[in-house]
Image (cartoon, grey):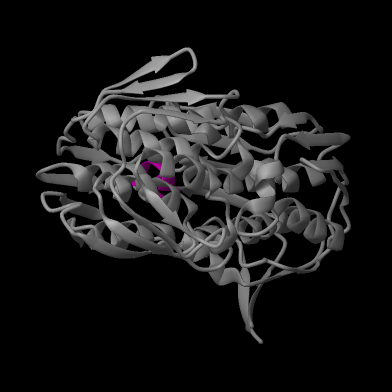
Amino acid sequence: MKEICVKPGVLSGTVSVPPSKSAAHRAIICASLAKGQSVIRPVALSEDMKATMYCMQQLGAQMTLCGDVLTVDGSQTLSNGSASLDCGESGSTLRFLIPVAAAGGVETVFTGHGKLPERPIGVFTDCLPEKGVECQTQGGLPLKISGRLQSGVFEIPGNISSQFITGLLLALPLTDGDSEIVLTSPAQSVGYIRMTLDILRDFGISVEETPTGWKIKGGQQYRPRRFTVEGDWSQAAFFMTAAALGGKITIDNLNPDSQQGDKACMELYARFGARITRDDSGAVTIEHDRLRGTEIDASDIPDLVPALAVTAALCEGKTVIRGAERLRIKECDRLAAMTDGLTRLGADVTETADGLIINGKKTLAGGRVEGYNDHRIVMAFTVAAVGADGDITITEPDSIRKSYPTFFEDHQRLGGHTNVIMG
């Protein structure tokens, strides 16, 4: 099995992170539902992006990728009577497209790999049959749907992944009648719902916010357009960790006004004590300073927890991360994975039901940690080497292809040193 050995050392310089995976998923789907030609740029071919592009092509969209420019013609989307959609390991692809395919009346079989077949889809298997869609499943994937999604009132809990809400927001404008999404509990990951609403508006779809959710008129038409994908704050967090632990890094393609929930990392690293500045172009610079522990509610920013946990392990004092129970059903149980890896490196970590309690130390030890075939775990332990006194060896480094295929190249450009070990 391939492993990667990361040597200790400070990272410094300027880097451009990949375009936002969250925004690109949504834009590709919206463009594929528009009757005409859209242009989306930049698009990075991570495994998750390949999954969404493949699935939309199976549903009838035409796509051409030239460099990082994706041209999409959605004139024939949802014209197929049936489709087989392999969503790879992408939860966004799966949860966005179940209601979209249902809105088109496409008889669809959804499959996936890794942990995706085990990840929850019960929100849809509960509510879609009441609205004309038959769901056949043994509890996960494969899932077969048939019938056409009908408009109406959809009552769903808000304390679930926002991906379910986004899927309905993408699909319901295509139904014949008006619909309403009613949340039965407060929403989490609100920033990503706002991102969905913004991108829908960009593609000509109108959604009305209500005190308990959203009203969506039926019979709307997506309009083609040119769309620019902003930089990914989720990926930026790993280099923010590296800079906070030692060094100075500028990330030059972030949007400070982004709706990405993980934009909160800028405030969180400042709370840890890192020095953060941004210039008129939007570039964000993070520089090491004395770090101290803090308390973090991760209910809206679960993807940041691996990077934040590494930072906390090298802060003065105690950090408490709570509200992150959803991390147990990601590509791996990320709370258990970070506890295991940080403990192997000598950190003082206690795992709780919904988070981590970390008492910081001055340095971490070198050692071998499991990557758990999870891109965010691998990237977190890569930047942990900044604060280690020995090499850190990480298993399954190729998992970064899921979201950030050029991560190790960017790490090296900033001064990082890695060696691949073939087992």
Identify which residue is drawn at 37% across, 38% down.
131
Q: Quadrant of the C terminus?
A: bottom right
Nearer to the camera, 154 or 192:
154
Left or right: residue 288 compared with residue 103: right
Nearer to the camera, 177 or 321:
177
Identify which residue is drawn at 26% across, 24% down.
217
Q: Does residue 332 show up magenta in the picture?
A: no
Q: Does residue 20 show up magenta in the picture?
A: yes
Asked if residue 106 is positioned above or below residue 27 in the image, the reply reads below
**Displayed quadrant of residue 194:** top left
Asked if residue 288 is positioned above or below residue 365 in the image, the reply reads above
Q: Position of residue 11 (x, y in %)?
A: 62, 52
Asked if residue 307 is positioned above or below residue 320 in the image, the reply reads below
Q: Position of residue 70 (x, y in %)?
A: 22, 53
Q: Position of residue 393 (x, y in %)?
A: 72, 71
From this viewpoint, is residue 422 visible?
yes
Left or right: residue 300 compared with residue 105: right
Q: Quadrant of the N terminus?
A: bottom right
Magenta segment boundaries in residue numbering: 17-24
Left or right: residue 105 compared with residue 181: left
